[in-house]
Image: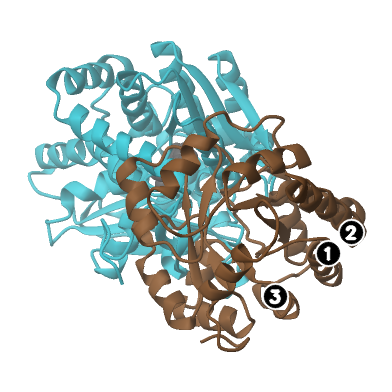
Chain colours: A cyan, B brown
Amino acid sequence: MREREFGPYGGRFVPETLIPALEELERAWIEAAADEAFTAELGELLRDYVGRPSPLYRARRLSERLGQDVYLKREDLNHTGAHKINNALGQTLLARRMGKRRIIAETGAGQHGVATATACALMDLECVVYMGAEDMRRQRPNVERMELLGARVESVEAGARTLKEAVSAAIRDWVANSGTTHYVIGSAVGPAPYPAMVRDLQRTIGDELREQVLTAVGRLPDRVIACVGGGSNSIGAFVPFALDADVELIGVEAAGEGVATGRHSAPLATGARGVLHGAFTAVLQDADGQVLEAHSISAGLDYPGAGPEHAWLRDEGRVSYVAVEDDAAVDAFKLLSRLEGIIPALEPSHALAWLLANPNPGGVDALVLSGRGDKDLAEVLAR
Amino acid sequence: MSATGAATGAERIAAAFAGHGKRAALMPYLMGGHPSKEESLAAGEAAVAAGADLIELGVPFSDPLADGPVIHAAGTAALEAGITPGDVLEICAALAPRVPVVLMVYANVVLADGPEAFAARAAAAGAAGLIVPDLPQDEADEVRAACDTAGLALVALVAPSSTPERVAAIGANARGFVYAVSLAGTTGERAELPPELSGLVERVRAATDLPVAVGFGISTAEQAATVGALADGVIVGSRVVRAAGEGGAAAVGAVIGELAEALRRG
Ligand SMILES: Cc1ncc(COP(=O)(O)O)c(C=O)c1O
């Protein structure tokens, strides 16, 4: 098998039309990342506009209950309420530098769409967000937010009308418009250079976390736990710990109605290798290579693929991938609300649920609370 | 060696481009299994009877990134009706004795069982080649080697955005013919042909001795005649798929008849 960025994984499985645009993007990103003026502007925005560094909070009552230290990395306190803004701001700054005045994005839970619409308002760029019709229904408040911010939300009616189809619609738009348009992909997925670029923009989570834990407890955590949809908050959290062999890294996927039912979103825990949205990676698919629909209560995890770097970290044995069912995630959502006064998004509620079921008595764990749960109230209360 | 005698896929494609007796070879695209398995075979037969020189046969895929609404919807309908790659290969086998069939198939279907296995199955069904729209030059080595071994031509695509270096590399590795994508975008009917088309065809010609066929956005007889004056082959997709959905084999035959007539007149 050919060597790609991440062992055999990654690559650019896209129409020829897009290859020059991806090459241009890769060059622009390498230049921008090495340009002090660019990194200084991004750093200033992350500090003053997003509110970074995000706090590391020792969850008092949760820690007491589990008999261990649980540290929550509070990405939910970022402007717009999730980690997605770290990536969206970086990519829109890059687009502006490249002279692209039109921005497109896909969104599942709506968090990435809101983050991108926010960045576009700030930078005065046109913004179109593709969103599955089913996700528009279950994440209504975020649709309204995007529109208020000046974005146009395009409803996607194909397939299961969720995140996979929204990504496909955005890629089709980009094939036609890459000369004028930058596609702000929302997770560490897609053709190169996206998975590496999104990781680089999200690793601020892990860099801060590492320093904050060292300051708080004088040592590294035993485990770093994060939920995995496409895999951006998790890859950003994991990468700074990659060489710390004593730190266990745990990626929590969505088991939906149960891995055994086939209605889940756990390609890393269960899936075969395949091509999805331009990358060779872990994909839920049938024997003919048709990509299967994912299932999860959480729109942000409802995706049949995961980023190629995760597939590699899995094969290398560096990260353990596990999966948590809808019901357990909802219980964790409610529990954190009651115990800590923090309403988590359903996505990181999966990571919390895994921790609740697998505590580390006497130990120290860090968990990425990737977003806040306001968007999920209707979905949870309806159950 | 292929199942249909001594000629390789590349040789059968070359013969079709050499012997059509028109301005350019006419290559309609049909979605395998749309509107049904039987009707799609009948549509292929009608297309051949009406003057198609090669058939591009689509294998339905769950996530067809290169396709616009008409072909996407046809593929989705075929999948919903239970059509599998195996069904499309049966349609291919029925058409292959009469005309070179080139399968348009997305990378994940080719890779699912490994490229060698897929190429062997396609060759056994009499296919002359594969077009894999999401397998650019940089990712194509394994699949090309598997196709070469099986006697199939892996047809390469060039786009208006392809840089001179890429066009040269694509031309050097091309098999069968080169597929020039006329425009930046997905498949679908367009009112106008892109103005830079002749420049694109010239750039591709300079990079290969193989025939150059143009596809994407061609639907009318007039457009086909214009493209036929520039290129060696004319590929018509969404217009033909729409006809198959609206009026089955008879409608496909009528559309192909008009397009073939326009290519003959020039
Ligand atoms: C709060 C939150 N967490 C996690 C995710 C999953 O994405 P990723 O795996 O890229 O972090 C999403 C996606 O929408 C999200 O909104």
Could you tell me residue B183's position as x and y percent? 55, 37
In this view of the protein, which residue sits in the foreground, B198 or A64?
Answer: B198
Whether tag 2 and tag 1 are in contact, CB under 8 A, the answer is: yes
Residue under numbered circle 2:
B248
What's under tag 3, amino acid-wise? Cys
Give the label on residue B43, or none.
1
Q: Is residue A73 left or right of residue B195?
A: left
Query: Do the dots labelled 2 and 1 sit on one chain?
Result: yes
Assess mark 1: CB under 8 A from ligand 1?
no
Q: Quadrant of ligand 1?
A: top left
Residue drawn at x 71%, y 80% is B97
Task: Give the residue pinned by disc 3.
Answer: B92
Residue B48: x %, y % from top left: 79, 66
The mark nearer the N terminus, 3 or 1, is: 1
Distance from label 3 to label 1 (Cα)? Answer: 12 Å
User: Quadrant of the rendered structure where residue A250 is?
Assistant: bottom left
On the same chain, marks 2 and 3? The answer is yes
User: Type of residue at label 2?
Assistant: Gly
Q: Is residue A285 visible to the viewer in this orientation of the structure?
A: no
Specify the subunit that label 2 lies on: B
What secondary structure is marked by label 1? helix
Image vertical order of residue B84 relative to residue A319, above or below: below
- Pointer 2 and pointer 3: residues touching (CB < 8 Å)? no
Above or below, A249 against A18 in this view is below
Report how many numbered discs are placed on residues in the image: 3
Query: Helix, strand or loop at disc 2?
Result: helix
Q: Label 1 amino acid?
A: Ala
Residue at image location 51% in from the left, 75% down from the top: B152
| Residue neighbourhood size for the residue with mark 2, other residues' Cα within 10 Å, grouped as few (<14), some (14–19), many (≥20) | many
Tag 3 secondary structure = helix
Discs 3, 1: same chain: yes
Mark yes or no: residue A52 visible: yes
